[in-house]
Amino acid sequence: SSELTQDPAVSVALGQTVTITCQGDSLGTFYASWYQQKPGQAPLLVIYGKNNRPSGIPDRFSGSTSGNTASLTITGAQADDEADYYCNSRDSSANHRVFGAGTKVTVL
Amino acid sequence: QVQLVESGGGVVQPGRSLRLSCAASGFTLSNHAMHWVRQAPGKGLEWVAVMSYEGNDQYYVDSVKGRFTVSTDNSKNTLYLQMNSLRAEDTAVYYCVRELVEVAGGTHYWYFDLWGRGTLVTVSS
């Protein structure tokens, strides 16, 4: 099965821009989706596909893909964006799904 | 109201069984692929299993294959996860999740748009 690799943690100053990456072989075939999870809460979809935001997600969240790497960018990070972020995709078999290990974003 | 509500979690001894339920409301379960995702305490998300659209196929992560079974009762609009031969490493919050598919320009996008609040399973003697 495939794996998705994420950096464990990243920090960003309030109002600045941060990019989280997710690397994996399956991303050359399938788009990633991104989920925000705050302590004690269920994950929340923030980006899917090429660069699609569900209703209610601020436009400071954006996504992109290049080769086998998907990226989630927060432009003008807010204190409320402090959370764990997970990428997800179908694996190479296309039947299973796989999550990255998650990136903890700290807003300073 | 569109929502998923899990139940059935609890404390169980190693080697025993437990069945989780996920009641869907506001939409028809069989019209979507439905997944179970778990999260061990302090750890990341792990995909566990999927019941495909219309219930034709089921797939599992290797660590639960042969022990867990996903099923549905369409009359109750409910998804289940039968967990047998439970191990300490199965301890986690189990989430029921709906998957949507969009097609744009010939490309398919799959994503998890609706999550339940989760139910905690603790495997301990």
Image: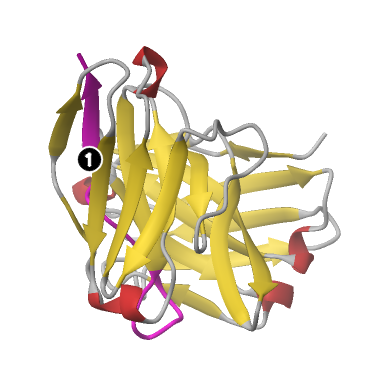
* Residue drawn 49% across the image and 49% down it: A47
Residue B44 versus residue B20: which sits nearer the camera?
B44
> Dot 1: within a 10 Å radius of its alpha carbon, few (fewer than 14), some, or many (20 or more) residues?
many
**Residue B21 vs residue A100: left or right?**
right
Answer whether residue B42 is visible to the viewer in this image: no
How far across and how far down the image is residue A62, in percent?
44, 45
How far across and how far down the image is residue A37, in percent?
39, 32
Residue B51 position (above or below residue B116) = below
The quarter of the rendered structure image containing the C terminus of chain A is top left
* Residue A55 lies in the magenta stretch: no
How far across and how far down the image is residue A48, in percent?
51, 56
Instruction: Place residue B57 in its image quadrant.
Output: bottom right
Residue B98 versus residue A57: which sits nearer the camera?
A57
Count of picture labels: 1
**Residue B103 vs residue B42: left or right?**
right
Q: Which residues are magenta?
A: A90-108
* Residue drawn 65% across the image and 79% down it: B105
* Residue drawn 31% across the image and 54% down it: A71
Residue B121 position (above or below residue B30) = above
Indicate the amino acid at tag 1: Thr
* Residue A100 lies in the magenta stretch: yes
**Residue B92 vs residue B59: left or right?**
left
Residue A91 versus residue B107: which sits nearer the camera?
B107
Answer whether residue A22 is visible to the viewer in this image: yes
**Residue B7 vs residue B17: left or right?**
right
Instruction: Place residue B66 in its image quadrant.
Output: bottom left
* Residue drawn 35% across the image and 47% down it: A72
Residue A93 versus residue A79: which sits nearer the camera?
A79
Instruction: Place residue A24 in its image quadrant.
Output: bottom left
The quarter of the rendered structure image containing the N terminus of chain A is bottom left
**Which residue position is annotated with label 1?**
A103
How far across and how far down the image is residue B49, in percent?
46, 65
